[in-house]
Amino acid sequence: MLTLCRASDVPADEPLQVVLDDGHALAVYRWNDGFYCTDDLCSHGEASLAEGYVENGQIFCPFHMGSFCISTGEPRAAPCSVPIRAYKVTEQDGELRIER
């Protein structure tokens, strides 16, 4: 399990970017009392999804306003058409973790 951050680090109203030791960036979301994580890079325009916003369980890319489901990574609105990787998040002792 890979520790991302403390649960308290993730704001309720905006994504948090977490950069791993290998330079890979992830976006972490708090939505509906749950935590979600996807790759941070949009598959359409190479924008940081952590700079977008979450609404109805979707992350909206700040580049062209396409969106992805934060739990599955599936594209939900054009121009996004290629899924992004989504990670299962577990919370333990106040820390958020994923398997990679």
Image: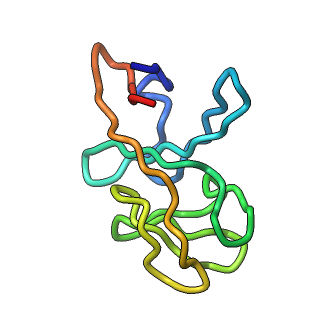
Q: Is residue 75 left or right of residue 35?
A: right
Q: Quadrant of the C terminus?
A: top left
What colouring does the structure picture have? rainbow
Q: Position of residue 77 (x, y in %)?
A: 49, 83
Q: Residue furthest bottom?
A: 78
Q: Position of residue 99 (x, y in %)?
A: 39, 28
Q: Position of residue 5 (x, y in %)?
A: 49, 24
* Closer-to-camera residue (9/29): 29
Q: Residue at x 62, y 58 (%)?
A: 49
Q: Is residue 23 left or right of residue 31?
A: right
* Closer-to-camera residue (83/48): 83
Q: Residue at x 44, y 22 (%)?
A: 6
- 65 up-or-down from 8: above or below: below
Q: Residue furthest top?
A: 93
Q: Quadrant of the N terminus?
A: top left
Q: Position of residue 53 (x, y in %)?
A: 54, 63
Number of numbered callouts drawn:
0
Image quadrant where residue 92 sits: top left
* Closer-to-camera residue (85/50): 85
- 27 up-or-down from 4: above or below: below
Image quadrant where residue 98 sits: top left
Q: Residue at x 44, y 44 (%)?
A: 37
